[in-house]
């Protein structure tokens, strides 16, 4: 399996990183994880075809994780796609997503390829060999009351990918390291976000679980400036492969 980083920016738009988007690859077949604003351009820049994406998984509905989805459907259509696309998203968002599509003049019954919208399930399997388990990240706990007032649920997930060879964890956005601690026992690879965490917490979390390979994503500019200090900190914790990721990094796991 290969993990491609398409977009590793935090919620802040910056010139050197796209918003949240990643590809999981299995021998030329792809899953897209998150579709933040700009995802189509990120795919085009990395010369990735929108035709090879079999399914899209959305961790939560902040714009930097989902706003690129309608244009991605247009990109696929204009690239000549005919094969079905499965989209997995938080349950409460499904009806609104269709309403949004209609207003973008994207009518599924007239679209040149089937758009299959599914609700995220606790566990999903792809290619018979990749098991995906969801865990709650409590990222949206702070806005739960206001969201409820507007009739909106707060759903936010991280994903654990498992094959016979290993475990790859992508936290997406989290409320805190403690919030996800109960759900992650160990992993070969951890892709953790750096906008709602501190380098110390990340190092402690990875060291406690003997996770050999760690990448930090959702990178705020201030973290980028601390790259050298981060390297030293990782060595103190005995973590030999902990780095800030970048758009274009490909991880083989
Ligand atoms: Zn978010």
Image: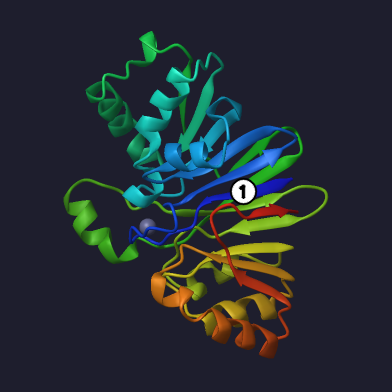
**Residue pictured at 68% horizontal, 40% vertical:** 25
Residue 34 point in image, percent of width and height: 47, 45
Residue toward you, 135 or 162: 162
Image mark count: 1
- Under circle 1, the secondary element is strand
91 vs 211, left or right, is: left
Residue most extreme to the bottom: 236
Q: Quadrant of the C terminus?
A: bottom right
User: Please, which colouring scheme is shown?
Assistant: rainbow
Identify the residue at the far right of this view: 165
Location of mark 1 (residue)? 4
Residue at 72 percent of width and 71 percent of height: 211
Q: Residue at x 54, y 60 (%)?
A: 171
- At 76% from the left edge and 38% from the top edge, which residue is drawn? 129
Image vertical order of residue 103 relative to residue 113, above or below = below
Q: Quadrant of ligand 1?
A: bottom left
- Percent across and percent down for residue 14 are 36, 60
């Amino acid at each position: 399996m290969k993990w491609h980083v398409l977009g590793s920016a935090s919620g802040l738009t910056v010139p050197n990183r796209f918003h949240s988007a990643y590809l999981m690859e299995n021998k030329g077949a792809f899953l897209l994880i998150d579709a933040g604003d700009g995802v189509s351009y990120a795919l085009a820049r990395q010369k990735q075809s929108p035709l090879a994406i079999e399914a899209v998984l959305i961790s939560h509905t902040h714009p930097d994780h989902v706003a690129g989805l309608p244009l991605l459907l247009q990109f696929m259509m204009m690239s000549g796609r005919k094969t079905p696309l499965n989209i997995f998203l938080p349950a409460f968002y499904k009806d609104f997503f269709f309403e949004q599509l209609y207003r973008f003049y994207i009518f599924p019954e007239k679209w040149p390829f089937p758009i299959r919208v599914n609700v995220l399930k606790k566990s999903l399997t792809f290619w018979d060999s990749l098991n995906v388990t969801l865990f709650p990240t409590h990222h949206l706990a702070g806005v739960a009351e206001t969201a409820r007032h507007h009739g909106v649920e707060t759903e936010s997930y991280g994903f654990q990918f498992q094959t016979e060879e290993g475990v790859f964890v992508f936290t997406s956005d989290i409320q805190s390291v403690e919030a996800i601690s109960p759900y992650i026992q160990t992993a070969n690879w951890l892709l953790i976000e750096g906008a709602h965490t501190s380098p110390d917490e990340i190092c402690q979390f990875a060291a406690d679980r003997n996770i050999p390979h760690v990448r930090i994503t959702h990178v705020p500019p201030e973290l980028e400036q601390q790259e050298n200090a981060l390297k030293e900190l990782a060595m103190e914790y005995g973590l030999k492969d902990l780095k800030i990721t970048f758009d274009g990094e490909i991880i083989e796991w």
